[in-house]
Image: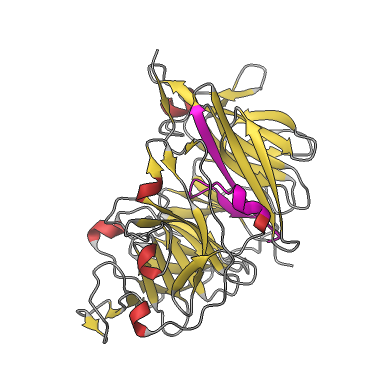
Amino acid sequence: MSTKFLKHAWRAGTVILILVTACAPLPSPAAFPTVQMIPATQGAQLLPTREASPTISSVVPTVKSPPTPAPPLPPAVGPALAYLKSGDIWMVDEPGSEPYPLTVAGDILSFAWAPSAERLVAFNGRTLCFFHRDGSVRTACLEIGLSDEQAQVERRLVLSPDQRWVVLWNPASPPPADEIGWIIVALDSTNTMYRIQDPVDWGAQITDPVEQGGFTGKPVFLPDSRLIGALSHRSLCTAEGCAYKLYEFDLQNRQFTPFNQPLESQSLLVSDGAALDLTTDGRMLIEFGAVFESCESYSTRVNVTDLEAATVTNHVLDDENLIGMDFQPGSDQAVLARSKGCRDSELPAWAIQCRLTSDQEVLPMQIWNPETQQRDDLIPGIAPAWAPNGDWIVFESCLSQGETGAWQPDGSAAPALFLFSSSDQTITTIDQGALSQWQPRVN
C-alpha cells in the first residue's frame, strides 16, 4: 500500500523569523524596482529608470465605459451570501431564500465584497468590474493589460478597508517562476498598478544572503489599511511544502519590510501561504500550517495574534492536518476543515471522486474550543465560513441524504454549497457553486 504527503504539508522544525517593522524613509530612486507606466491601449512608454525590468511594472489600466444600469433588486435582509457559479456572481439574500444571479457576465473567475458591503469587485482574467449590491449599477471596468498567459492564472481579490486599493493574488504555492504573484491597483484617478513577481525586487529580505527567487502568498489588509502578506522563497520549499514569513508592503514607498508582531510569535509562525486570515472584527490575525515528520507523526500549529493587545497564542493540534479554519464572530470557538495527512493512493476518496478536492481525503469538520481543547464533529466539508451574526456556517461538500434523511458524503454527488445552522444543527443545500463569501457586517 503506497502513501504520499499532501503538497501543502510542512517540514518539521521549520522556524519563521519575525523582525520589528520600522517606518522606512522614502528610498532613493535606485532602491526602487523598475517602474513602467503603460497605457493598456498603447505601447510601453518607459519613464527614467535605472534599468528596464520585464517582471515589475506600474500600469495605468484602461477605463471602459460602464454598461446600461440593470433594474434595481429588492433590498437584502441578510445575512446575505454571494458565491460563484458558471462564471457569474449569485446571491442569497438570507439563509433559506431563493438564489438568484447578480451578474450576467458569464466569465467571472473571482470576486470580493467591498468592506462597505455596498458593492462587489469581480475579475475575469483581464478586467476588474464593480457591481452594486442591489444590482442597479455596474461601475466602470478597468482593463489591467495582462498577457494571454497571465490572464489564465488563477487570481483572487482583496479590497482595502478604505477602498483605495485592490490586490489580485495568486494562490499557487509555489507559483511557476514566470507568473505574477500580486497585482496591486490603486482605485483612484491614477489607477496606478504594481505587478510583483519576485518580492525580493521590492525590498523583501527573505533569505540571508538575499537572493532572487521569492514569491508571494495571501495578502490581508488590516483595519488601518496596512497591507501584509505571506512571502516565501524557492530555497525554502521542499517536496512537502514551502515555509512562509509575514511582511508588510508600504504602498507609498513600494517596499516590503518584516511585519511587526509580538516577540512571542517569533519562535513559531507557520503558514502555507494561503492559511492567513483576519477575524470578522479585525482584532485577531490567524495563521496555521501542518508540520510533518511521517504519515504517523504530524500536527497543525495555529497562531492567534491579538493585534490590539499585541499578544499571540500558539496552539498545537496533534495528528491533525487542517485545510481550513474560521472563528465564530463574538466567540472564541472556531470551525475546522480537516483532511488525512497521508492517504492510500490506490483507493480514491469520495472527495476526490466528486472533484471536491484534487488530492485530499476530507474528514468531518469540527467545532473547536481553543480554551478547553474540546472538539465536536460535524459533517465532512471544506472552506467553512461563519456568517457575520454567528448563526450559520457555509461550506462546500459532496453530500446526499439517506433514507432516514441523514446527510452523508457521496462521491457520485456534485460539489455544492451547504448551510449548517449552529442553533438546531440542521443542514440545507444552497446551490452548486464555490468561493462563497458572506456580506460584511458594517457597524
The image quarter in which residue 323 lies: top right
Q: Viewed as shown, does residue 45 lie left or right of 81?
A: left
Counting labels gives 0
Q: Viewed as shown, does residue 299 lie left or right of 176?
A: right
Q: Viewed as shown, does residue 109 lie left or right of 380?
A: left
Q: Is-magenta flag for residue 287?
A: yes
The stretch of residues the image draws in magenta is 264-293
Placement of the N terminus among the 4 image quadrants: top left
The image quarter in which residue 317 lies: top right
List the single residue furthest toward the bottom: 48
Q: From the top left corner, tell me how far across and down residue 113 is, in percent.
A: 56, 62
Q: From the top left corner, tell me how far across and down residue 271 is, in percent.
A: 53, 47
Q: How is the image coloured?
A: secondary structure
> Height in image: 368 above or below 106?
above
List the single residue furthest toward the front: 209
Q: From the top left corner, tell me how far across and down residue 299 is, in percent.
A: 58, 32
